[in-house]
Image (cartoon, rainbow, N blue to C red):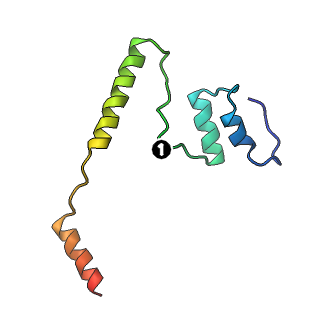
Amino acid sequence: MERTPKKKAGAVLEALRAREQVLTPQEDRAVRMVHGLGVRSDAPLARLAPEGTELADELLLLEVQLARQARARVPRTPSPAKSKIVRTLRRR
């Protein structure tokens, strides 16, 4: 990855979006940490294992299972103590 001049606004974002430049997951994380950039909430997890290996298949299976669990998660009901505190504060 080329070093970009400091004066050019958005140079880091352009470098990350450029199709011909591919960063390793470690490089991507370092660039995002240095410049305070977030990751999209719907972005897939970084692929650490080479494609087609048994490890890659297991990691993909784990990712799919975790995504299903996250979607199926039901919001918890608030505790009675918390509800009582909220009601008391609303009356004030």
- Locate residue 5, reporting x and y percent: 83, 42
Q: Quadrant of the N terminus?
A: top right
- Among all residues in the image, which is located at the extreme left? 80
Residue at (47%, 41%) from the top-left corner? 42
- Locate residue 3, reporting x and y percent: 79, 35
Of residue 29 and residue 78, the one placed in the foreground of this image is 78
The residue indicated by pointer 1 is 41
Residue at (38%, 12%) from the top-left corner? 54
Dividing the picture into quadrants, the one containing residue 82 is: bottom left
Residue at (31%, 42%) from the top-left corner? 71
Q: Tally the marks.
A: 1
- Among all residues in the image, which is located at the extreme bottom? 92
- Locate residue 81, reporting x and y percent: 18, 70
- Locate residue 74, reporting x and y percent: 24, 49
Residue at (47%, 32%) from the top-left corner? 45
Position of 73 compared to 17: left or right?
A: left
